[in-house]
Image (spheres, grey):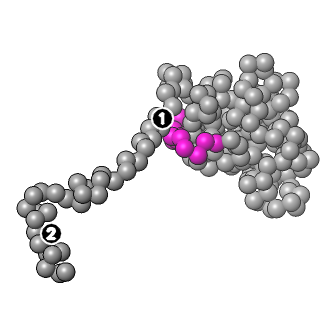
Amino acid sequence: MQLVLAAWLALSLLAGMGAEDMCGAPPASPAHSIPAPQLSPEERLSPHMPESLRCDACHAIAFQQLRRVEGKMGRKTLSESDYVEVLERSCSQGWESYGVQEVDGEKRLAGPGLLRQELMSVMVMGGPWPGRLSKMCHSYVGEQGEAQIYGAHQQGPAALRELLCHGEKGACASAGAPRCRTPCGLGITL
């Protein structure tokens, strides 16, 4: 039996037949191609957050404000100097994990606190996105004031999102704003 097997192996090698020829080629795996979002000149070059992404950006800012204030002291009430410091510092750091991805053919901001992120997609991170989020965050603190933002924070996530994003002048209030991706009346815990 060993002699027959050895002879078969030798003849197979001489004939140039590999295992693929005898057993068939391995099944081809389906190729997946996931393109990166195609950014317009405004989305690539402008120092400002594009209008179409402002609602998502506002929700990201509200989420980060909540997370950072609670990270400072938990649920304990902060003194004015503490919450002013935390809110100012929170606008200047930690935006690197945000970027843009395409969801159902529409460009959306993606990152912590934003729901419905595609698992199989390319996200464009870095570049102008952290600076744009920081700039928007500082403008909210300047427009609303630290005391009002902290007061909304104490009422809960929905109150803070309402103040920053859904009020009369909020980024999500305009008729052209993209649909809300976060549970607008509910808190987010991640």
Q: Where are the magenta residues, as a range?
A: 117-129
The residue under the point 57% across, 36% down is: 101
Q: State the quadrant of the C terminus.
A: bottom right
Q: Residue 117: which numbered mark, if any?
A: none
Using a 10 Å C-alpha cutoff, classify the residue at mark 1 as few (fewer than 14 neighbours), some (14 to 19) or many (20 or more). Answer: few
Q: Is residue 144 magenta?
A: no
On screen, residue 165 versus residue 109, left or right, reads right
| Residue 137, above or below 87 | above
Using a 10 Å C-alpha cutoff, classify the residue at mark 2 as few (fewer than 14 neighbours), some (14 to 19) or many (20 or more). Answer: few
Q: Amino acid at mark 2?
A: Trp
| Residue 30: image location, x then y, percent | 43, 44
| Residue 53: image location, x then y, percent | 65, 29
Q: State the quadrant of the N terminus.
A: bottom left
Give SS at disc 2. Answer: helix
- State the residue in front, 69 or 110: 110
- State the residue in front, 145 or 28: 28
Q: Amino acid at mark 1?
A: Ala
Give SS at disc 1. Answer: loop
The residue sitting at the left extreme is: 14
| Residue 176: image location, x then y, percent | 73, 19
- State the residue in front, 21 or 171: 21
On screen, residue 16 versus residue 62, left or right, reads left
The residue sitting at the bottom extreme is: 2
Quick check: can you spot residue 147? Answer: no
Find disc 2 in the rendering and name its residue: 8
